[in-house]
């Protein structure tokens, strides 16, 4: 039997990186998302999956729908399917556990705004 925590696949992004530990297993994908200080992901939504974010470190700047809030370690947020959302790292950066339910596909990212010209 393997260890409880396997080494994940790291994907670098202009805003930071994410490490995938479980990919599309029974409709669930689990990642740790690290957002560098002052950076943020695109404002986006997904047609095929919902997400739950749990702040692990730092302060996560969260926008879900039209609501903006700060998540501190241990706090979480739900992002329903087809709901616009954005995650930011604040002044010190953040680390967030992301649990996606549904079909996880990077092509299912519909970007509405992006600091890195990817719209």
Image (cartoon, rainbow, N blue to C red):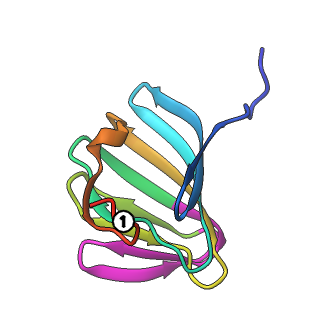
Q: Residue furthest front?
A: 117
Q: Is residue 79 above or below residue 8?
A: below
Q: Which residues are magenta?
A: 54-74
Frontmost residue, 49 versus 86: 86
Question: Who's the residue at 39% across and 52% down the image?
Answer: 51
Where in the figure is residue 24, as x and y percent of width and height? 44, 29
Question: Who's the residue at 63% across and 74% down the image?
Answer: 93
Assign the C terminus to one quadrant of the image: bottom left
Where in the figure is residue 60, as x and y percent of width and height? 54, 74
Q: Quadrant of residue 107?
A: top left
Q: Residues within 10 Å of mark 1 (few under 14, many from 20)?
A: many
Q: Quadrant of residue 33?
A: bottom right
Give the SS element for disc 1: loop
Q: How many marks?
A: 1
Question: Who's the residue at 20% across and 46% down the image?
Answer: 47
Q: Is residue 10 above or below residue 2?
A: below
Where in the figure is residue 4, as x and y percent of width and height? 75, 31
Dominant secondary structure of the residues highlighted in magenta in the image: strand
Where in the figure is residue 91, as x and y percent of width and height? 61, 85
Residue 61 covered by magenta stretch: yes
Q: Is residue 55 above or below residue 17?
A: below
Q: Residue furthest bottom?
A: 91
Residue 19 covered by magenta stretch: no
21 sits to left or right of 109: right
60 sits to left or right of 57: left
Residue holding disc 1: 42
Q: Is residue 111 above or below residue 46?
A: below
Assign the N terminus to one quadrant of the image: top right
């Amino acid at each position: 039997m393997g260890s409880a925590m396997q080494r994940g696949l790291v994907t670098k992004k202009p805003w930071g990186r994410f490490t995938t530990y479980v990919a599309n297993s029974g409709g669930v994908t689990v990642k740790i998302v690290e957002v560098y200080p002052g950076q943020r992901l695109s404002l986006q939504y997904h047609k095929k999956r919902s997400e739950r974010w749990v702040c692990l470190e730092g302060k996560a700047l969260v926008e879900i729908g039209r609501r903006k809030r700060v998540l501190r370690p241990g706090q979480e947020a739900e992002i329903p399917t087809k709901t616009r959302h954005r995650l930011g790292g604040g002044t010190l950066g953040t680390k967030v556990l992301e649990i996606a339910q549904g079909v996880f596909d990077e092509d299912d990212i519909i970007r509405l705004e992006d600091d890195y010209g990817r719209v």
